[in-house]
Image (cartoon, rainbow, N blue to C red):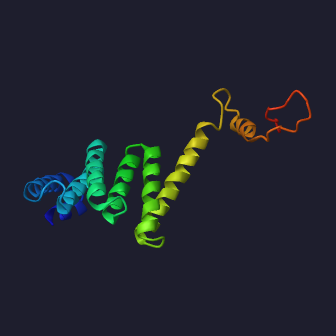
């Protein structure tokens, strides 16, 4: 309880100390894969995430997720919560593609397990939509202009990649080539 109070006050170091103590005690008394021990490990991962300690948070998130998959199944709500937490850790540490893919997988399972209108499903659906929109904007920004003079080249490039295929069998020399619509 005190660790939670520290956590909510943003007193991360004090929360961490207590969470480590609780985690170690639970590992000793209950075992490493006991549900209460896993909650303690997940709480510590959350504290690391809030401190910007992405690698440590990721390591604990993966440990909890894999153990919960084994013990509870990959569709159990606790497993899905851990999957979402790992996705948030990856997103925070600039592993955007991996985060989006994991949250997408998690969301598909949440829809099956919790239902389409469950608050967690709705929240993660909104988050995934925001992440995907941002990723699309960033991708568009990468190829929108060329490096010399800032001329727009992506429109021409995308037109070539989306151009209709010429397969009219009229025996002209342009069979099997893309038609340039420009």
Q: Is residue 65 left or right of residue 92?
A: left
- Which percent across, then down, holds residue 97? 47, 45
When the figure is inspected, residue 116 is found, relative to residue 160, above or below; the finding is below
* Residue 51 visible in this rendered orientation of the protein: no
- The residue at the point 35 percent across, 49 percent down is 89
Q: Which of the pair 117/174 is nearer the observer? A: 174
- The residue at the point 83 percent across, 39 percent down is 181
Q: Which of the pair 166/26 is nearer the observer? A: 166
Which corner quadrant holds the C terminus? top right
Q: Is residue 116 left or right of residue 29?
A: right
**Res. 176 image quadrant:** top right
Q: Is residue 112 left or right of residue 54?
A: right
**Res. 46 image quadrant:** bottom left
- Which percent across, then down, holds residue 141? 59, 41
When the figure is inspected, residue 56 is found, relative to residue 77, above or below; the finding is above
When the figure is inspected, residue 158 is found, relative to residue 17, above or below; the finding is above
Which corner quadrant holds the N terminus? bottom left
- Which percent across, then down, holds residue 94? 41, 43
- Which percent across, then down, holds residue 166? 83, 37
Q: How many marks?
A: 0
* Residue 55 visible in this rendered orientation of the protein: yes
- The residue at the point 29 percent across, 51 percent down is 66
Q: Is residue 135 left or right of residue 86?
A: right
Q: Which of the pair 92/170 is nearer the observer? A: 170
């Amino acid at each position: 309880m005190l660790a939670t109070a520290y956590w909510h006050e943003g007193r991360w170091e004090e929360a961490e100390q207590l969470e480590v103590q609780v985690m170690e005690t639970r590992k000793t008394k209950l075992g490493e894969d006991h549900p209460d021990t896993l909650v303690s490990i997940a709480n510590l991962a959350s504290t690391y995430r809030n401190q910007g300690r992405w690698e440590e948070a990721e390591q604990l998130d993966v440990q909890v997720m894999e153990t919960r998959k084994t013990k509870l199944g990959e569709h159990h709500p606790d497993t899905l919560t851990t999957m979402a937490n790992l996705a948030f850790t990856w997103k925070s540490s600039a592993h955007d593609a991996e985060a989006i893919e994991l949250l997408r997988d998690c969301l598909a399972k949440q829809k099956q397990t919790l239902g389409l209108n469950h608050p967690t499903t709705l929240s993660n659906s909104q988050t995934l939509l925001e992440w995907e929109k941002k990723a699309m904007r960033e991708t568009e920004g990468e190829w929108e202009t060329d490096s010399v003079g800032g001329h727009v080249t992506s429109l021409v490039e995308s037109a070539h990649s989306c151009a209709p295929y010429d397969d009219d069998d009229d025996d002209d020399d342009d069979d099997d080539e893309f038609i340039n619509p420009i």
